[in-house]
Amino acid sequence: MRKLEKKLVSFNEIDPGGFYMKRLSILFITVVILVCAVNTSFADETTMSEEPVIETYRAKVLKIESIKEEYPEANITLIKQKVDARILNGGLKGEIVEAENNMSGNPAYDIELKEGDIISLGMEQGENGERLFHVKGYERTRYVYQLIGIFLVLLVIAGGWKGLKSIVSLGVTIGLVFYVMIPLLLKGISPIFISIGVCAAATIITMIVITGWNKKSLAAIIGTIGGITAGGGIAYLYGLLAQLTGLSEVEAQMLLDIPQQVKFDFRGLLFAGILIGALGAAMDVSVSIASALTELIQKDRNLTFRQILKHGMNIGKDIMGTMSNTLILAYTGGALSMILLFVVYPRPVNDIINFDFVATEIIRSIAGSIGLIFAIPITAISFGLMHKKNESR
């Protein structure tokens, strides 16, 4: 054993200044970005459909003419509108066109226009080659982009260089989801392995970009991946025990009839959704504990493994309550309309919980919170073991 310990050397002796590890980290990030770029072509091939092409334009409403049509036998009143609008972008910019907008009295679907509104127009080719325009909705993209811009600017102002690195890591994470995970799911590959791989890659890249390659980032990576995997595994297990279909959402049901005819593992998609949904919170928990323990070690390098674990758990206890609330309240906020319906149309509690979509949401939120709880001891133990290993050398 002593001979083995003598052969063990620290990272600094092998790699002074972390030179090779930093180069390895840059290489890893570059490879991931290249994979994202390559998978863009897969996404284009996979998501092709036979739906007619609809061109979209931004336009300003100039004039509205309304015609009311009543159908007493069906107790329905329709309002058909002819809308004159000036196109504001694209090859038809400046052209005034006529579009249709129909309203049935249902506020969920009706688009109530007034002169001066900026709207989104869809254009299709008719059977005789004529252009047919219809109102798709209000133009909201500019406000969405404005808010995203404000967020990014504030991130840089408040965080400085760290904020800029956060934007880079966020961009890579989004790229992994949309250009790696989604195309592979559409190819019918198991969502369980894909989601674990994407979450692991996103975690590693984020930690390396934000904190560099060190003991703190390594402990946070282990804690994050371990926590969300545990939470997702529990969700998958209880999904099987409760016989959840994974088809509780309308969007999931629509996937049964997509033109690509992909056979999805809907329980696996539920697992993947929990991992992606809890990833950000788990990273937050893990890096907070690892950062705090790093500060403690710098103050007192004689801390034992037991003391490090105790400090990590104490720090985690303060984080645990707020983070669990964050995750559960996020799911509750998304299901607020459903909760109101159950209040308006009261039913026994057991009947409500027994609904597939209700049980799904409960298991999703509780399993995600369990993943956060697991992330705390895993991060503390990983940090403590690495500190102990360094001290023994």
Image (spheres, grey):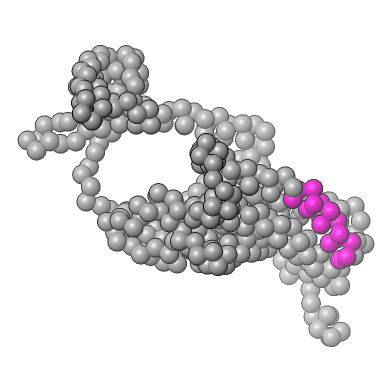
Assess whether residue 205 is covered by the magenta stretch. no
Assess whether residue 313 is covered by the magenta stretch. yes
> Which span is picked out in magenta?
305-320
- Where residue 261 sits: x, y (%)? 29, 61
Front one among 174 and 347: 347
| Rendered view: 71 above or below 29 | above
220 on left or right of 270 = right
Q: Residue at x 63, y 47 (%)?
A: 327
Placement of the C terminus among the 4 image quadrants: bottom right
250 on left or right of 49 = right
Q: Residue at x 84, y 62 (%)?
A: 309
Front one among 185 and 370: 370
**Residue 333 seen by the camera:** yes
340 on left or right of 103 = right
Front one among 266 and 344: 344
- Where residue 299 sits: x, y (%)? 90, 52
Name which quarter of the figure residue 127 lies in. Answer: top left
Placement of the N terminus among the 4 image quadrants: bottom right
Front one among 225 and 258: 258
| Rendered view: 305 above or below 319 | below
**Residue 43 seen by the camera:** no
